[in-house]
């Protein structure tokens, strides 16, 4: 999230969740890293960060409520993190009343954002709801038309939109809206034409999907997540692939990159991945980084494929932390002028990477398939030794007369836990200091945190900590090196 301008003294030292040496992060940095890497309510390999998020957010609401509001809006709009933005909105409604209006008006995009926020508040704090929350919910619910209200009416959920109206008492702005609110209260909204209602009524058939696709009523996310059903039904998939691979549609969709890889893997496992479908997903992934600036010089990309990276993002998800790390590594290599990719876990016979060295080095071309790279390298096992990429860099530059690396980019959960890295007492920072002293004093370390456990293996100048699962984290590599921006400063400057 930001550069650590800390010393390597004992005051900055701590231990990580594995009990090994690490560096502290500030509360603001811990909060950002946890927020942007959390499916709230889901377990993680080394334990949930949910309680940390609530505690840190509550403290931030008292110390810097504007930052918490901006982080919440950033998580929803840029990080594409929906559920965690609901949690933070609930905290703001409880602890920072003055920012309730701006937060709710930025976070509420669909009617069910309202019911999720209020349900979250009730789960965390019980009743009554704060007056500021009720006032702003009453205002934002007036944005929506009958189709939107009917589509997200609440179904069999415990809190429905009619409950929201009874709690917040919005004043209709017109006679038409008064009729609409009455329909919500009486549960007489016209059943919307959606892919869900049509499939429920008519079945998952070729004819139904052909009709739905032609109607234009199926959004980008629904097309991507239903791609398997569409193909299996025998419907014409050509217009779907055209939409999925359209760069403008990719940008508007705000899909996290791993969604494309998830679809690719699912179709591959079902043996229904055609060359046309594969190309559409590859094009979509490429489009998501199409306008990013090239990273100059020589870059070492370090992808953690240790056992803890097998942790899935949620109990229902097939996407694992190692999948995101490998995907980001492949995407980053596309942006680099000259890159070597290091897949690492630890040294030892259990290492699936290389039992003698604990790492494997690969060089990819700018036109190598991102999806192929992910499929071949998303394998996790063994301990976590974050020193291994730096040991490779030291050996590589010591053995050959070549240009030193300008930077290393780590994609990891940062839970170093290997005795081979120096036991309980040593962090990886010493290897970085050695590399700078011997080969490149301007060497940068960029740590992309994929789990937000709250500690790091690096500190000091020329260290840039980033967090998140969105491709939007990658530009902060160059922004930090140019001295014009980090993730924390972007959030601090985010307009609300």
Image (tube, grey):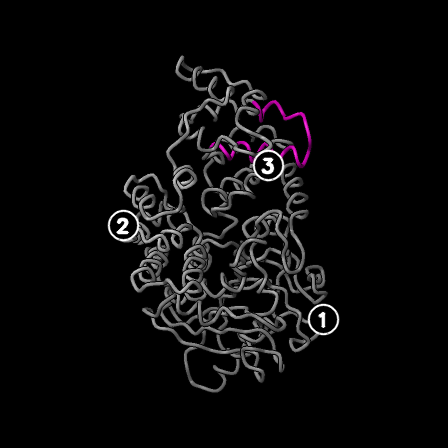
Residue where numbered disc 3 is placed: 65
Q: Are marks 2 and 3 in contact (CB under 8 Å)?
A: no
| First along the sequence among labels 1 and 3 | 3
Disc 1, SS: helix
Q: Residues within 10 Å of mark 3 (few under 14, many from 20)?
A: many
- Residue 412 image position (x, y, % from top left): 55, 64
In percent of the image, x 40 and y 52: which residue is there? 229
Residue where numbered disc 1 is placed: 425
Is residue 237 depicted above or below 107 in this figure?
A: below
| First along the sequence among labels 2 and 3 | 3
Viewer-side label of 2, 3: 2
Q: Is 196 or 36 nearer to us in this picture? A: 196
Spatial CA span between label 2 and label 3: 46 Å
Residue where numbered disc 2 is placed: 239
On screen, residue 393 versus residue 242, left or right, reads: right
Which corner quadrant of the image does residue 190 belong to? top left
In percent of the image, x 49 and y 53: which residue is there? 486
- Characterize the magenta stretch by its predominant secondary structure: helix
In percent of the image, x 52 and y 56: which residue is there? 466
Q: Residues within 10 Å of mark 1 (few under 14, many from 20)?
A: some
Spatial CA span between label 1 and label 3: 37 Å
Number of dots carrying numbers:
3
Residue farthest to the bottom, as pictured: 399
Residue segment shown in magenta: 111-134
Is residue 494 depicted above or below 328 in this figure?
A: above
Disc 3, SS: helix
Is residue 279 depicted above or below 95 in this figure?
A: below
On screen, residue 230 versus residue 314, left or right, reads: left
Q: Are marks 1 and 3 in contact (CB under 8 Å)?
A: no
- Residue 415 image position (x, y, % from top left): 63, 64
């Amino acid at each position: 999230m930001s550069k650590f301008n800390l010393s390597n003294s004992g005051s900055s030292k701590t231990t990580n969740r594995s009990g090994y040496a690490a560096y502290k992060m500030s509360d603001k940095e811990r909060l950002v890293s946890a927020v942007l890497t959390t499916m709230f309510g889901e377990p993680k390999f080394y334990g949930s960060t949910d309680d940390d998020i609530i505690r840190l957010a509550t403290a931030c609401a008292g110390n810097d409520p504007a930052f918490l509001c901006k982080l919440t809006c950033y998580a929803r709009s840029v990080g594409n993190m929906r559920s965690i933005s609901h949690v933070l909105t609930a905290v703001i409604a409880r602890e920072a009343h003055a920012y309730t209006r701006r937060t709710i008006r930025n976070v509420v995009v669909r009617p069910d954002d309202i019911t999720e926020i209020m349900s979250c508040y009730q789960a965390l704090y019980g009743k009554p709801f704060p007056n500021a929350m009720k006032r702003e919910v009453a205002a934002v619910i007036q944005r929506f038309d009958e189709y939107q209200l009917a589509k997200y009416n609440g179904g069999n959920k415990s809190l429905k939109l009619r409950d929201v109206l009874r709690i917040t008492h919005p004043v209709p702005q017109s006679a038409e809206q008064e009729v609409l609110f009455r329909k919500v209260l009486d549960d007489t909204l016209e059943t919307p034409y959606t892919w869900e209602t049509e499939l429920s009524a008519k079945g998952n058939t070729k004819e139904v999907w052909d009709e739905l696709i032609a109607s234009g009523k199926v959004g980008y996310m629904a097309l991507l997540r239903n791609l398997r059903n569409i193909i299996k039904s025998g419907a014409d998939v050509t217009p779907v692939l055209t939409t999925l691979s359209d760069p403008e549609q990719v940008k508007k969709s705000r899909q996290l990159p791993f969604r494309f890889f998830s679809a690719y893997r699912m179709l591959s496992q079902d043996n229904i991945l055609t060359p046309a479908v594969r190309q559409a997903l590859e094009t979509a992934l490429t489009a998501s980084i199409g306008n990013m600036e090239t990273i100059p010089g020589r870059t070492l990309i370090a992808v953690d494929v240790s056992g803890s990276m097998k942790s899935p993002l949620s109990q229902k998800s097939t996407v694992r932390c190692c999948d995101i790390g490998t995907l980001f590594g492949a995407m980053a290599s596309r942006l680099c002028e000259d890159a070597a990719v290091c897949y690492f876990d630890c040294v030892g016979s259990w290492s699936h990477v290389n039992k003698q060295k604990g790492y494997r080095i690969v060089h990819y071309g700018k036109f190598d398939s991102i999806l192929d790279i992910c499929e071949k390298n998303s394998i996790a096992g063994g301990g976590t030794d974050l020193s291994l990429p730096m040991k490779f860099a030291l050996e590589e530059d010591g053995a050959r007369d070549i240009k030193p690396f300008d930077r290393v980019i780590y994609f990891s959960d940062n839970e170093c836990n290997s005795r081979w890295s120096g036991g309980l007492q040593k962090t990886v920072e010493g290897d970085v200091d050695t590399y700078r002293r011997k080969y490149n004093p301007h060497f940068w370390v960029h740590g992309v945190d994929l789990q937000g456990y709250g500690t790091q293996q690096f500190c000091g100048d020329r260290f840039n900590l980033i967090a998140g699962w969105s491709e939007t984290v990658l530009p902060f590599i160059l922004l930090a090196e140019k001295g014009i921006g980090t993730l924390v400063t972007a959030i601090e400057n985010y307009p609300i």
